[in-house]
Image (cartoon, grey):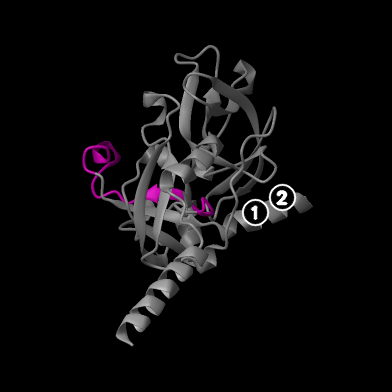
Amino acid sequence: MKKRLVLISLICTFACAGSMPARADLAQTLAKVKPAIVGVGTVLPTRNPARMFAGTGFVVGDGLTVVTNVHVLPPLLDEEKKELLVVYAGSAQHPDIRDATVIARDPEHDIALLRISGKPLVALALGDSNTVKEGATVVFTGFPLGMILGLHPATHRGIIAAITPFVSPAYNSKQLDVKTILRLNHPFDVFQLDAIAYPGNSGSPMYDPETGMVYGVVNSVFIRESKENLLKQPSGITYVIPGNYIRDLLARSRTQ
């Protein structure tokens, strides 16, 4: 009787295992995600260097729409000297520089949408960020050190350490800029990651390591002392704007 029960148990185990969906390896997910990761910057022929990097972006939708942060974009372009907003796609061996135009901004949530020229690139899918739970494992891919290492996007893994209101304390009136005041008046929840990011990671997608589904965009890093010390002494705390704000901005941009 005991042998029969053991046999039945083994059969059930193998049968159940066979019916479970396969878990994608992170390496397989990266192969799908990395072609959609781009650098965001400017080109000015009379400047040295002519090409400047400002942050990371990622492609969504029809393959010609790029998501990044508003703070990644230059405040003004020197149109007289023909400075251009561009997206750096492709690889270090075969860079693909695309002209870009800002088509939508959401300053409150620090999200911007760009329209790029040329053929469509690989696009990432946006998931429902309301389904993300604390403790979930996530990854993000971008250019932490800018173009110092060339077009080689790096990937970092972490967990959702907390879902918390995105309001940074102001210790004096000089720290109360427009963006901070907006957050004080309209606080919203963001994902706090137990993961190290750097300034160049601004605009990186945060996604599920198994599916590649995007659930947010890296916004900022908690700085303990000064920006100069950030590379030497990273805090290990990264803030991510939930992806549903990206979906809302995409929907609004289509109706304009």
- Mark 2, residues whose alpha carbon is within 10 Å: few (<14), some, or many (≥20)? few
In the image, is residue 254 part of the stretch drawn in magenta? no
How many dots with numbers? Answer: 2
Q: Would you name the residue on which mark 2 appears?
A: 253
Between 11 and 27, the one nearer to me in the picture: 11
Outermost residue to the right: 255
Quarter of the picture containing the N terminus is bottom left
Q: Position of residue 222 (x, y in %)?
A: 32, 51
Q: Position of residue 190 (x, y in %)?
A: 45, 61
Q: Would you name the residue on which mark 1 appears?
A: 249
Residue type at numbered disc 2: Ser
Q: Position of residue 233 (x, y in %)?
A: 21, 43
Q: Spatial distance from mark 2 to mark 1, Cα to Cα?
A: 6 Å
In the image, is residue 219 part of the stretch drawn in magenta? yes
- The vertical placement of 228 against 105, above or below, is above
Indicate which disc residue 187 carries: none
- The vertical placement of 221 against 3, above or below, is above
Residue positioned 56% across, 38% down in the render: 36
Q: Which residues are magenta?
A: 211-233
Q: Position of residue 203 (x, y in %)?
A: 49, 43
Q: Secondary structure at mark 2?
A: helix
Q: Secondary structure at mark 1?
A: helix
Q: Is residue 59 left or right of residue 47?
A: right
Residue 174 visible in rendering: no
Residue positioned 68% across, 34% down in the render: 120
- Disc 2 to disc 1: CB gap under 8 Å: yes
- The vertical placement of 141 against 138, above or below, is above
